[in-house]
């Protein structure tokens, strides 16, 4: 049986040849997942040039997983897990794999929620629209003790993951989370009171801008990617309008978007009397990636 280090290098090279963007990380992650180790255990064993457990079945399983990754199935679908902020979310076919840039969107929503005046019940009400696996909304519930979070998601398949992920949370967090099967563009009837923050990572890719990464193109659900209309913004615009109905006066909307879409979304919000303090925020690489606006008026 080859050593851990030899195997790690071999798998890294095969993944790199297949065009996998982060071959060294994914090789270690596939090995860790197969052997029930942490990624750091793999790296330590590789550095010491330890040998593998002798079980040939484990090696067959690893081979099968490497073949799937070489075919560009997302790593998160193979391991079934996607790390996001403090959570490890369950994901798979039929649900959008959460991205690191959405962690920053979550951070901005959290900051605004923490600064918000709580509702009469003492809670800050947050609504996550197009919640997918629950990445944004469940993180906010987990990281803010007085947040009550409703998560609206239209897809049956995504709802399965959303509910699985909600159920994984400690009871004290789970009791403040409410998954809703519904269309974010018309969900007002699910709510009795107003929200202090609406946060959303809607589909926003234009239909003619098909993503280059096979993992995205072939495996993320199209309804989570394409925002419809000529510019991919039909769904985001409808969600801005719905957010105006969902928010309390003084409440905030935070919406992720593509790097070239800031101006168009600011312009849409500015056409309505319900929005003020309309601005665009950047991700960690300095690109325009979020619309932030405050609900004003009556
Ligand atoms: N961010 C997605 C991507 O990287 C695009 C769609 C979305 O997040 N809503 O492909």
Image (cartoon, grey):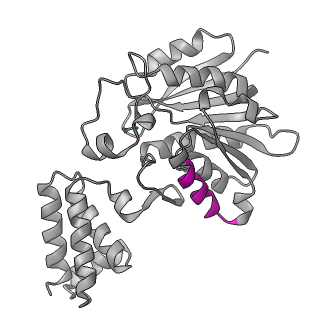
> How far across and down, in percent of the image, does residue 60 sit?
23, 77
Q: Does residue 266 lie above or below 49 as drawn?
A: above
Q: Is residue 202 above or below residue 55?
A: above
Residue depicted at 21% across the width and 88% down the height: 51
Q: Quadrant of the C terminus?
A: top right
| 141 is higher (above) or lower (below) than 188 | below
Q: Is residue 15 left or right of residue 252?
A: left
Residue in the foreground of this view, choosing between 98 and 107: 98
Query: Foreground residue, 60 or 204?
Result: 60
Residue 23, position as x, y percentages in the image: 21, 59
In the rendered image, residue 129 lying in the magenta stretch gets the answer: no
* Start-end of magenta stretch: 159-170
What is the magenta segment's predominant secondary structure?
helix
64 up-or-down from 280: above or below:
below
Q: Is residue 167 magenta?
A: yes
The image quarter containing residue 249 is top right
At which x and y percent is residue 217? 30, 40
Quadrant of the image occupied by residue 83: bottom left
Q: Residue at x 41, y 41 (%)?
A: 221
Q: Residue furthest right?
A: 120
Q: Residue furthest front?
A: 156
Spot occupied by residue 206 in the image (x, y as percentages of width and height): 36, 24
Q: Quadrant of ligand 1?
A: top left
- Residue at 23% in and 80% down: 59
Q: How many marks?
A: 0
């Amino acid at each position: 049986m080859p050593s851990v280090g030899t195997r790690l290098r071999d798998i890294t090279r095969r993944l790199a040849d297949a065009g996998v963007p982060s071959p060294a990380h994914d090789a270690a992650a596939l090995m860790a997942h197969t052997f029930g180790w942490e990624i750091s255990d793999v790296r330590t064993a590789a550095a010491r040039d330890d040998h593998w457990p002798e079980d040939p079945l484990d090696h067959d399983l690893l081979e099968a997983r490497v073949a799937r990754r070489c075919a560009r199935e997302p790593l998160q679908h193979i391991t079934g897990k996607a790390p996001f902020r403090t959570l490890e979310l369950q994901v798979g076919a039929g649900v959008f794999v959460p991205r690191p840039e959405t962690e920053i969107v979550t951070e901005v929503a959290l900051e605004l929620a923490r600064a918000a005046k709580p509702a009469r019940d003492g809670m800050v009400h947050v609504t996550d629209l197009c919640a997918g696996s629950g990445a944004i909304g469940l993180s906010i519930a987990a990281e803010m003790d007085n947040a009550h979070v409703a998560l609206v998601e239209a897809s049956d398949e995504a709802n399965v993951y959303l509910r699985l992920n909600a159920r994984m949370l400690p009871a004290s967090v789970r009791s403040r989370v409410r998954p809703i099967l519904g269309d974010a563009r018309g969900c007002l009837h699910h709510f009795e009171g107003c929200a202090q923050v609406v946060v959303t990572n809607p589909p926003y890719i234009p239909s003619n801008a098909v993503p280059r990464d096979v993992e995205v193109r072939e495996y993320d659900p199209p309804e989570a990617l394409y925002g419809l209309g000529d510019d991919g913004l039909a769904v985001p615009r409808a969600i801005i309008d719905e957010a105006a109905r969902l928010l309390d006066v003084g409440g905030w909307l935070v919406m992720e978007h593509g790097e070239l879409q800031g101006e168009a979304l600011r312009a849409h919000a500015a056409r309505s009397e319900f929005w003020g303090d309309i601005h665009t925020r950047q991700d960690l690489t300095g690109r325009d990636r979020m619309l932030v606006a405050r609900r004003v008026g009556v």
